[in-house]
Image (cartoon, rainbow, N blue to C red):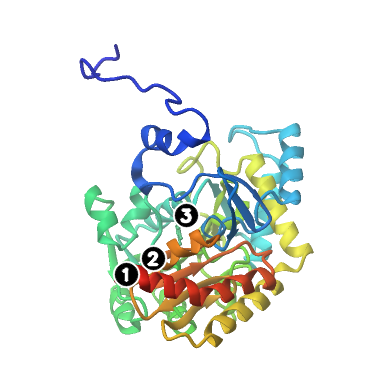
Amino acid sequence: KLPGAAPDAPVHSAGAGEGTGGLAERYREALLPVFGSPQRILARGAGVRVWDTDGTEYLDLLGGIAVNALGHAHPAILSALTKQAETLGHVSNFFATAPQIELAEKLLTLAGAPAGSGVFFANSGSEANEAAFKIARRTGRPRILALSNSFHGRTMGALALTSKEAYRAPFEPLPGGVEFLEAGDERALAEALAPGDVAAVFAEPIQGEAGVRPLGGEYLRALRRLTRDHGTLLVLDEVQTGMGRTGHWFAHQAIEGLQPDVMTLAKGLGGGFPVGAVLSFGADVHDLLQPGQHGTTFGGNPLAAAAGLAVIGTLLEEGLLEHVRTVGAQVSADVLALEHPLITEVRGDGLLLGIGLAQPIAKQVAAEALEAGFILNAPDESTLRLAPPLIITSADLDTFVAALPDLLTAATADGEN
Ligand code: PMP
């Protein structure tokens, strides 16, 4: 018996329910229930479609929440991973590998980063934000600002930057020094920065988890101007918005001349394989983290880097950024053209879209959509989020737009029952 085990605690028996029919039960018995019950157990994916263990097909309009940039089982990623796994799968941080170096160079080029900039690789968005938090601490300034409705992740540092009380409260005390400002309020920002003791402002160009809410060009420009004036770092969290999602490599590039001091990435970067990154712009920022002050075992692993290179290569070769702008604008226009009384607006850019609803029925609509073979989600009760693979065609998006009125009707009927 293990020390500390309850005297008669039953021991977990693996695979109690046999076959795929028992998977839901086995999930409940074997995994921490932090995400509630899974909606379906998925078995296979190809392109923009996935199939569950019963063989039911779904159009994936969520792409693993803005992760599967090239869809499922894309040949470019498969061949890059196979080739890399056959060549060199992992090395310690005492060594470097060509894919890691190449991915860093590509990211710096795409970001238009000046000489002296650099990349730190992590494994997730939260971890990338943890590193950015540490960079901010290294300025020696005590205060950090984040915005209302922010989401930067669930690890302790990232959580300290995340505004939602329900996520924070169970884990206090969180790392200190973080204050929240009303997103969009330029005056509050100017006042908060005025004492000159703010290390960094963290912001998402489009707040994805908050319901796909763009900060807007005017406020982003003010963020840049005011942080620069006060020697404060502007950290843009492009975990959800980066890597072509909005039809630009990075969402901030939609605004002429805007460049952050630090940018965090993950999600779409590896196209489904775990890799995150922190870019520090310019030597002054780059030098804040000194050798030995931060690290991770897996970050920038050759396999993850190979996946990242395959994603970037394919986005470039297939002109997918332009495609994202075109089909994103088209589906937004088509949803609005329904002139449905329950649809108030479409927010976001490219293929990160939030369909605003006039009633708090988004969760019911998402459930109806799943039944009808569409995967999407409801980041809040009156928003439907679309973040499909960037390779999705207008024809596939059309099938969803055509189905939407019926989904809304069915969801409204649900609420009345
Ligand atoms: N930042 C943003 C903007 C995100 O949307 C997310 C994930 N939804 C994260 C950070 C956290 O990323 P991860 O789940 O990979 O830790």
User: Residue at 69% of width from left, 69% of height from top?
Assistant: 393
Viewport quadrant of the C terminus: bottom left
Q: Where is residue 121 in the image (x, y as percent from the top left)?
A: 56, 48
Sequence-first tag of 1 and 3: 3
Residue 166 lies left or right of residue 298; in this view the side is left
Q: Which SS class for mark 1? A: helix
Q: Which SS class for mark 3? A: loop
Residues at circles 1 and 3 in contact by the CB criterion of under 8 Å: no
Quadrant in the picture for residue 229: bottom left
Q: Which SS class for mark 2? A: helix
Residues at circles 2 and 1 in contact by the CB criterion of under 8 Å: yes
Q: Is residue 346 above or below residue 5?
A: below
Give the crowd class for mark 3: few <14, some 14-19, many >=20 residues within 10 Å: some
Sequence-first tag of 3 and 2: 3
Mark 1 or mark 3: which is in front? 1
Instruction: Determine which residue is flagged by label 3.
Output: 288
Q: Residue 364 carries which label?
A: 2
Amino acid type, callout 1: Gly
Q: In this view, does 140 lie above or below 197?
A: above
Residue 255 lies left or right of residue 226; in this view the side is right
Q: In this view, does 9 lie above or below 344?
A: above
Give the crowd class for mark 2: few <14, some 14-19, many >=20 residues within 10 Å: many
Quadrant of picture, ligand 1: bottom left
Task: Look at the image and tell me whether residue 376 can be seen.
Answer: yes
Instruction: Determine which residue is flagged by label 1.
Output: 415
Amino acid type, callout 3: Leu
Quadrant in the picture for residue 117: bottom right
Question: Gap in Å between the C-alphas at discs 2 and 1?
Answer: 8 Å
